[in-house]
Amino acid sequence: MNMLPFSVTILGSSSAQPTLTRFPTSQVVSLNERLYMIDCGEGTQIQLRKFGIKTGKINHIFISHLHGDHIFGLPGLISTMALGGKKGELHIYSHSELKLMMDQLMKFMIEFEDFKVIYHPLNFRSRAVIYEDSKIIVDSFPLKHRIPCCGFIFREKPHDLHLRGDIIDYLNIPIRDRIAIKNGADYLTPEGKTILNQDLTFPADPVRSYAFCTDTLCLKKIIPIIENVDLLYHEATFADDLSDLALKTYHTTARQAAQLALEADVKKLIIGHFSSRYKSVIPLVDEARVVFPNTFSANDGDKFNL
Ligand SMILES: [Zn+2]
Ligand SMILES: [Zn+2]
């Protein structure tokens, strides 16, 4: 199999306040060299530089909610993009209020000439497709936090079937018919005989998916949406001994995140959005692994391949 590179790079893994080792939330999803940013906490542009990700290649930013630790990096990042001569459009998917906040800020910033920021309001009531291109489809779905908040799921589009070279060559099938066969068509020979698609192809590569869930109470109702994903990022702001505080502040504990991953039958879990009270997050990972062994902590600069 020759699958396209699909990865998630953690730019920030702290909640609320930055620490010396963890910036607030931001991530970059990369599929075949295309970059998609999720959240943009303070200092995100510094992290992009530090981890060698090209700022100018980011054209789509998905913002889960409007708490400062998820958006304070946007004005600086946009300003840097404009100064760097970015052209074309930057699309931001967020609560509609973000545009009002950003318009106020941008009024006093540099003039953008060939660069436009376009805002797309999210749907906080139900799951919705919010972005699609030739390789990927992105859905938003509501989470439960102190203010409206969405999770995101990135799914590859279905791949073409693989042609069986030996049979294709033997039958001398023309190029235009090969394209149809890759998409599932049978083949009609010049003699009028039908060759079934299953005899001409091998199965397509599996479709990979990534789900991002922060900030939220642990929500069982999202299980049908995140079920079977290859990689789940879920917030685990607190360890389970602070479950009362998690409930009060609409956050999740490490054990709860692991239980959700287990019930949703995901392949791998990353926990993050850690409270700055934790000098080490090893106890949170250990707590999660009791329930869901394939759990890892998000650390700034970590890259997870799907
Ligand atoms: Zn947060
Ligand atoms: Zn929040």
Image (spheres, rainbow, N blue to C red):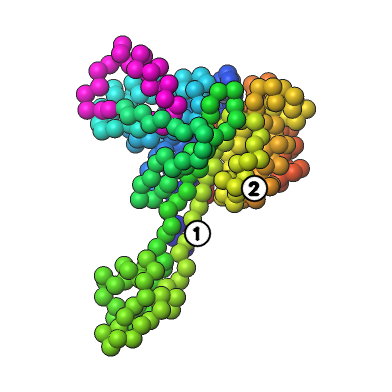
- Report x, y in % for residue 24: 54, 24
Q: Secondary structure at mark 2?
A: loop
Q: Position of residue 76 (x, y in %)?
A: 39, 20
Q: Position of residue 9 (x, y in %)?
A: 50, 38
- The image quarter containing residue 296 is top right
Check if residue 181 falls in the magenta segment: no
| Beta carbon at label 1 within 8 Å of ligand 1 | no
- Residue at x-position 56% and y-position 50%: 230
**Horizontal and vertical percent for residue 215?**
58, 29
- Secondary structure of residue under mark 1: loop
| Relative horizontal placement of residue 245, taking residue 108 as reference (left or right) | right
Q: Is residue 219 above or below residue 183?
A: above
- The answer to which image quadrant residue 190 occupies is bottom left
Residue found farthest to the bottom: 191
Residue 184 or residue 164, whichever sits in front: 184
The residue located at (49%, 38%) in the rendering is 140
Residue 113 on the magenta span: yes
Q: Amino acid at mark 1?
A: Pro
Instruction: Left or right? Give the position of 80 relative to 2.
Output: left
Q: Nearer the viewer, residue 215 or 126?
A: 126
Label 2 to label 1: alpha-carbon separation = 18 Å
Q: Which mark is residue 228?
A: none
- Badge 2 or badge 1: first in the primary sequence: 1
Q: Is residue 243 left or right of residue 136?
A: right
Q: Tell me the number on the disc at residue 206.
A: 1
- Tell me if mark 1 has few (under 14), some (14-19) or many (20+) residues whose alpha carbon lies within 10 angstroms of its own: few
Q: Amino acid at mark 2?
A: Ala
Q: Which residue is mark 2?
A: 264
* Residue interval drawn in magenta: 92-116
Mark 2 vs mark 1, foreground winner is 2
| 268 relative to 170, above or below | above
Q: Is residue 96 visible?
A: yes
